[in-house]
Amino acid sequence: MASKRPIIARNSKPKAAPRRTAVSAAEARAGAILEIDLGAIARNWRLLQSKVGRNVWCAGVVKANAYGLGVVPVAKTLAAAGCKSFFVASLDEALALRDVLKTPEIVVLNGLDAGNAHDFLKARLTPVLNDLGQVETWRGLSLADPRARQPAILHLDTGMNRLGLSRPEIAVLTTEPDRLAGVTLRAIMTHLACAEEPKNPKNAEQRRMFLAARRKLPQVPASLANSSGIFLGQDFHFDMVRPGAAIYGVNPLPGGVNPMAQTVGLKGKILQVRDVDRGTTVGYGAAHRMERTGRIATVAIGYADGWFRSMSPRATAFIGGQQVPVVGRISMDLMTLDVTGIDPAHLKPGAYAVLLNNIITVDEAGTRAQTIGYEILTALGRRYRRTYIGAE
Ligand SMILES: Cc1ncc(COP(=O)(O)O)c(C=O)c1O
């Protein structure tokens, strides 16, 4: 039946005893349990901070609900671990986070517009200025009320062609420095396009362009590296690094040994088990045909829970410590496993099939879905019962 053991093996035990009664009742109702290890998240962040050394500050990127893991518990955990700068994508995300974190710096990557700039001032948020128009808006506000003058981060595009001042805009800013007069610049940043490919010449190219532009701009701290960028070496660290995915256990060195700890475990409840004859088909499209007489277990997780349909031919789960294949197509709420030969003691309705652990990592799940670990994390379903373990 339902095991109380953590899904992902951990090095350290949680200090506080979990409140068993409340959790058990909710767990009993839930079709699937997502376990999020806050201790592992804190350790991952500390590892990244130690990798860049004391003179570089390590921010935490917590956009998209902390990559799907829950921005409130994650941000509190990172703040307790020593993180002082938090990056989100949108103003709404920043306002929600400000309710939880009263003092730390909250930076909004998607920038501001003339209509919402006052909200940044009111909630003490740091906008990323992504074009000359945003620079002008922030400057106008700063000059109008010098007491309310708040820092901003200037984003230079060096090769993503997504957000940030373009090359011609950078040229305008360097030849007309007055455009920044009155603006308090907290930092200048750029973003790498190919950080997870250490041999890609684009990394050095972007760094060179960043350095060249920076030389002609106010001498404020600089930031370039995301998770993988941190592993490109000291030359890429500058004054602040901005990891997201690695904090949550995604491998910043794809194809290499993952230095980060897994932070999520997932298990789904077995709803039904049935014996099926050789030749029987399973699921939509009758896409799987049993080659022998066997046994099928139906588990309460589907693509509406972020377990992508594209995984179907490659997906597996663990039951009673043994790996079994998903057979047939993953449907909206359900998937079917071939559990032929598995000890029936592990197959009672209410027992669990484990879908994410130290072997089926978020990166592995990403590969199986022909996507990346980032997408697996941010798609994790809202129907899961979420339990947070390992809080320090
Ligand atoms: C500008 C910027 N900085 C940092 C990050 C964090 O990147 P990662 O999750 O790869 O560490 C992102 C994420 O997309 C980003 O857009």
Image (cartoon, rainbow, N blue to C red):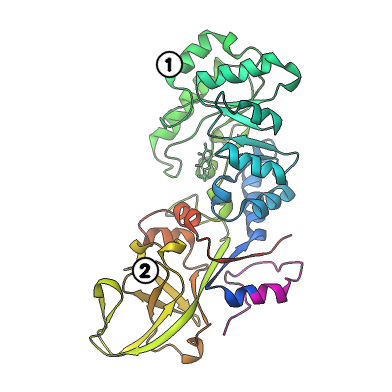
Q: Looking at the figure, which quarter contains the N terminus? A: bottom right
Which element type, helix, strand or loop, lies under badge 2? loop
Q: Amino acid at mark 2?
A: Ser
**Does residue 11 belong to the magenta stretch?**
yes
Q: Looking at the figure, which quarter contains the C terminus? A: bottom right
User: Mark on residue 168?
Assistant: 1
- Which residue shows up at 56% across the image and 73% down it? 30
- Which residue shows up at 54% across the image and 47% down it? 64
Residue sticking out furthest to the left: 279
Q: Position of residue 369 (x, y in %)?
A: 37, 60
User: Mark on residue 38?
Assistant: none
**Does residue 273 belong to the magenta stretch?**
no
In the displayed structure image, the side of residue 216 where residue 339 appears, left or right: left
Q: Main secondary structure of the magenta part?
A: loop
Work out whether residue 35 or residue 30 is closer to the camera in this orientation and state it. Answer: 30
Magenta segment, which residues? Answer: 1-25
Work out whether residue 91 or residue 104 is closer to the camera in this orientation and state it. Answer: 91
Pointer 2: what residue?
331
In this rendering, the answer to whether 147 lies above or below 377 is above
Neighbour class for label 2 at 10 Å: few (<14), some, many (≥20)? some
| Between discs 1 and 2, the one toward the N terminus | 1
Q: Are marks 1 and 2 in contact (CB under 8 Å)?
A: no
Work out whether residue 70 or residue 153 is closer to the camera in this orientation and state it. Answer: 70
Which element type, helix, strand or loop, lies under badge 1? helix
Which numbered disc, 1 or 2, marks the residue closer to the eye?
2
In the displayed structure image, the side of residue 50 where residue 349 appears, left or right: left
